[in-house]
Amino acid sequence: MSTDTLKEGDLIVITGSVLKKDEEPELNHILGEVVAVGKKDIFAFDTMTSYKSYRIFRVAKSRCVKLNTDAVSHNEELLEPKLGDLVMSIVEKYSTQEKKIGVLTEIIDVPGRSKQGKILQGEKIEVVSMESLIVL
């Protein structure tokens, strides 16, 4: 989407980077809102900060991507995995991601506890949280 169409109130993703010698730039992103638009730059604020304490900053239009919020389904429900579905589980453990892919063979629903599922990975069965699953 062209940044020439940015206007006050638009929701945008703003990209920054960390530069290190002899390394690829490390990209970082924030969600922002346009406050004012100039020829090549805009004023924006970080929408993730408290409304009363937001700080306006200027940024080049070329570092921004406008979000099309009309294309977002605001009330879409998650697809709940069913027995026999091919699923993926991703959980974070000690700042690393643990990914498992397999067939959902069992759903364990014990009152007062989190729902769990058993997935078959080759010949190995793994127990995972149902909250960590998506259907592939």
Image (cartoon, helix red, strand yellow):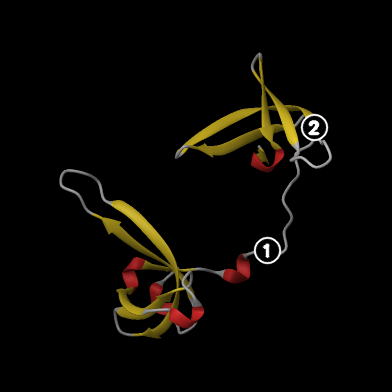
Q: CA distance from mark 2 to mark 1?
A: 30 Å
| Quadrant of the rendering where the C terminus is positioned | top right
Disc 2 designates what residue? Answer: 108
Q: Position of residue 72 (x, y in %)?
A: 63, 64
- Callout 1: helix, strand or loop? loop
Which label belongs to residue 53?
none
For image coordinates 30% across by 83% down, the residue present is: 39
Q: Is residue 108 above or below residue 37?
A: above
Which label sits in the foreground, 2 or 1? 2
What secondary structure is marked by label 2? strand
The residue most toward the top is: 123
Above/below status of 14 relative to 37:
above
Q: How many residues crowd around disc 2 within 10 Å: few (fewer than 14), some, or many (20 or more)?
A: some
**In the image, what residue occupies the spot 51% across and 68% down?**
67
Mark 1 sits on what residue? 73
Q: Residue 135 in the image: x percent, y percent?
A: 69, 39
98 displayed left or right of 77: left
The residue positioned 68% from the left and 43% from the top of the image is 131
Of the pair 47 and 8, the residue shown nearer to us: 47
Amino acid under disc 2? Ile
N-terminal of the two: label 2 or label 1?
1
Residue drawn 36% across the image and 62% down it? 15
In the displayed structure image, the side of residue 73 where residue 33 appears, left or right: left
- The answer to whether 135 is drawn above or below residue 31 in the figure is above
